[in-house]
Image (cartoon, coloured by chain):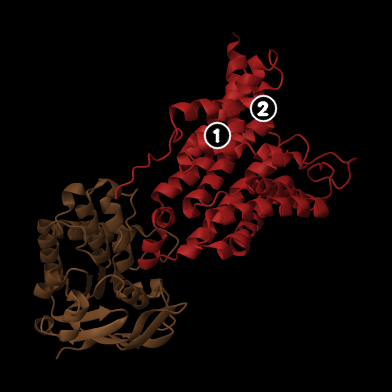
Amino acid sequence: MDFALVLQTVFNGLANGALYAVITAGFVLVYRATSVVNFAIAEFLLIGAYLTYTLSLFLPMLPAIFLALPLAFAFGVLVERGFVRPLLGRNVVAVIMATIGLASALDGAALIVWGPDQKAMGAASIAQLPKEVPNLAFSIGGVFLSSKAVWSLILALPLAILLVVLLKYSRYGVLLRAVSESETAALAMGINAPRVVAVAWGVSAVMATIGGAFLAGAAGGGGPGHHLVLLGLIVFPIAILGGFDSVPGAVVAGLLIGLIEAFSQLYLESLLPGITQAIPFVIVLLVLLVRPYGLFGQHRIERV
Amino acid sequence: MSRVLLEAHDLHLSFRGVKALVGVSFRVSQGDLFAVIGPNGAGKTSLLNVLSGLYKPQQGRVTFLGEDLAGLSPQQRVRKGLGRTFQNLELFRGMTVLENAKLGAELAVGAYTDLLPKARLEWEIRRHAEEVLDYLHLSPYRHAPAGALPYGLQKRVEVARALAGRPKLLLLDEPMAGLSLEEKQDLARFLLDARREWGVTLVLVEHDLKAVLELSTGVLVMSYGEVLYQGAPAGVRDNPRVAEAYLGRSA
């Protein structure tokens, strides 16, 4: 076994996994705060990536990404106000249907606004070269790390970890946990629960945008297209693997799936073509057989 | 006569024709232990929800410290010093007992309305939370997840969380329900102590007539949203309307 190759695969897996972790952490954050499963999460990626793309037409890549984040935050808050808030207290199925409807609507809207063809970041016409963030690719001792992998390791991974830390230790994190445990009590104690929930949606959209922009090639390799929606579906097995209501779980599961995919690509793909797409779901199935509450989910014990 | 802390005037509340409150008026003075009692469905919890701002009465008004509370959100009412606990436990179950109490205490020092941490206050918050836990004999369970404690202790944690917010007036929704006799006596003693120590005025909603009559300084008896009796606890038993509501009219 080639040690350098294995190491390189580890880094690449972690890099991809960090993007998954960021996106899924945002998704789980919303679930924790509001018990809403956001089936439009893949469209959050799409919109985030397209926002970044549009900004990248006028700006260099890095400022474009950073400017897209506040816009994404506003978008997340808007979704909460427009689609989720009106359904507060309704049957959970109603809210799920609403997010599925929202997903279709956003798909359509993206199609109308940005068109069906794949874009290249920062390129108005297909003849131009796509823009990228500054190239950070390097190679040491036979281990080659692409610019994309380095960027996602220095940007996405710390962001995912930061979210976990903030949730645990920051004031707003404690507030969010309080709202997620009992909204009634949070309200009665003077916590501005509606604002906390809106912030959770905003943060979720921000995380999805970072993940989306990078998956869509802001760090090299093309631009946004509708295939992002399919990529976004990876959120569900990762969230389930992590326990669905645990943000740290989502981060760990994201990294894990990233690693497994990378190694499957390296070793299994030649034997079983296409296995890499299926493997996250297979893993989830196996884990759920042994641990129905995922790797980090709360064991639900109900007392009466 | 001490000053009036909370006053409800002619409250009416109905849910699509079901009348929960029909012209309820009462006064709670500073330092009172005011009991609201009545059989199931009498409108006691509805009354509390109106007072704490979760329900909006169709008619009538609530004044707290002479100020009309109409239009104030539950959060704003809490910040004015109107705390409450819930009939069905509403603890932050995944957090430890101390974290629960700290959340209550943060509010008292005015933190948590801000986004950024205030390390300067952290010490005071922690100290106050620990003090309240100590007072309610909850210190041994400080670091246990609140949801894992036995029911009686969880009830006490809820009282601690509310007290940690230094309320001027604490609304307690059936704090005794489901407790054993011993736990009831403990809780009653803690409440009386808290009233003396921190000068908290208590409004106690109870199902159990007997437990309340021994404790309270004033009683409001309700049935089907109406006030049957208001006054000193001593007069309750002799009141014919109360006897009828509780025991039924003899044929």
Left or right: where does residue A145 sit relative to residue B224? right
* x then y, percent, for residue A250: 51, 38
Is label 2 in a helix, a strand or a loop? Answer: helix
Left or right: where does residue A52 sit relative to residue A297? right
The quadrant where residue B61 appears? bottom left
Farthest residue to the front: give it.
B251
* Residue A254's disc number: 1
User: Foreground: B90 or A74?
Assistant: B90
Under mark 1, the amino acid is Gly
* Residue A187's disc number: none
- What's the residue at 45%, 42% (across, down)? A246
Q: Colour of chain B?
A: brown
Q: Which chain is red?
A: A
Q: Are marks 1 and 2 on the same chain?
A: yes
Left or right: where does residue B136 sit relative to residue A223? left
* x then y, percent, for residue A145: 65, 25
Farthest residue to the top: give it.
A1
* x then y, percent, for residue A231: 68, 37
Label 2: few (<14), some (14–19) or many (≥20) C-alpha neighbours in 10 Å: some
Badge 1: chain ID: A
User: Foreground: A193 or B210?
Assistant: B210
Left or right: where does residue B144 sit relative to residue A145? left
The quadrant where residue B126 appears? bottom left
Under mark 2, the amino acid is Gln
Q: Is residue A28 above or below residue B100?
A: above
Q: Earlier in the sequence, mark 1 or mark 2?
A: 1
Residue B31 can be seen in this image: no
Residue under numbered circle 2: A277
Badge 2: chain ID: A
Farthest residue to the right: give it.
A127
- What's the residue at 39%, 57% (across, down)? A182
* x then y, percent, for residue A261: 62, 25
